[in-house]
Image (cartoon, rainbow, N blue to C red):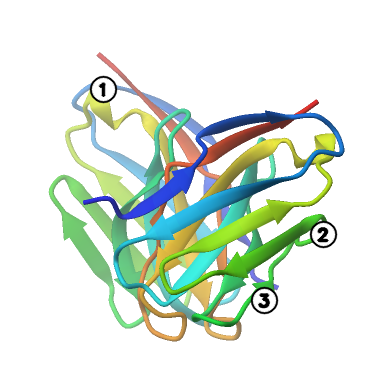
Amino acid sequence: NAGVTQTPKFQVLKTGQSMTLQCAQDMNHNSMYWYRQDPGMGLRLIYYSASEGTTDKGEVPNGYNVSRLNKREFSLRLESAAPSQTSVYFCASSEAAEYNYGYTFGSGTRLTVV
Amino acid sequence: KQEVTQIPAALSVPEGENLVLNCSFTDSAIYNLQWFRQDPGKGLTSLLLIQSSQREQTSGRLNASLDKSSGRSTLYIAASQPGDSATYLCAVRRLTSYDKVIFGPGTSLSVIP
């Protein structure tokens, strides 16, 4: 019953450091997504992958890169962390992008950049 | 541009009361609408998913309705319990950009024992 698993759960970075957030799903879903959640801003889409081998920018992609490593895994990389990237990051998956399926979310990564 | 709003932003009710949370969206061209629950410091848990062709979905004490033409959805919670205290978010999946789901800001619910 793992669903969507995110690692790490918490992370503190110094400005300029890099890190990769990992996400894996075991539901054989085709589509995967990265969101950030900030107070007063709600959930905003960073990047998504409609299917293995494809990635596209969402609403707030600047400062991030993604890799769809295989069908199960979708990672988010911060190359040079900035305080503005302090947020809670959520990974989600969906069976398919073009059909009427809902989302399953991971438990989140709480990132602080100092 | 699709915008999703939720009213009220916060709600406090005594235990046992029935309550309604509202979600409005500006573009009726949607695939579906999903209601989530988020506990403090936790991820989002899916509660109900309503397809665009459906009028309502029920799960236990929860009932969600969808009126696509008016751009509205409601989440009805019957006989509320303290364990229902959480933030409830609605999200719509658009037809024109099916890979992108738009979330509402959420309603923070407190059920007082």
Tag 2, which secondary structure? loop
Q: Is residue A100 left or right of residue B101?
A: left
Q: Amino acid at mark 1?
A: Pro
What chain does mark 3 sit on? A
Q: Position of residue A91 (x, y in %)?
A: 51, 54
Give the chain letter at badge 2: A
* Residue at the spot of label 3: A56
Q: Residue B93, how many percent across, how many down?
A: 50, 72
Q: Amino acid at mark 2?
A: Asn
The reply to whether discs 1 and 2 touch (Cβ–Cβ < 8 Å) is: no
- Label 1 chain ID: B
Badge number at residue B82: 1
Nearest the viewer among A99 and B109 is A99
The disc label shown at residue A69, or none: none
Question: What's the CA distance linking mark 1 and mark 3?
Answer: 41 Å
For residue B43, above or below residue B55: above
Q: CA distance from mark 3 to mark 2?
A: 12 Å
> A69 or A104, which is in the foreground?
A69
Residue B99 point in image, percent of width and height: 55, 77
At which x and y percent is residue B19?
30, 38
Q: Earlier in the sequence, mark 3 or mark 2?
A: 3
Q: Identify residue for label 2.
A: A62
Residue in the picture at 34% in, 28% down? B85
Badge 1: how crowded within 10 Å, few (<14), some, or many (20+)? some
> Does label 2 lie on the same chain as label 3?
yes
Callout 1 secondary element: helix
Q: Are marks 1 and 3 on the same chain?
A: no
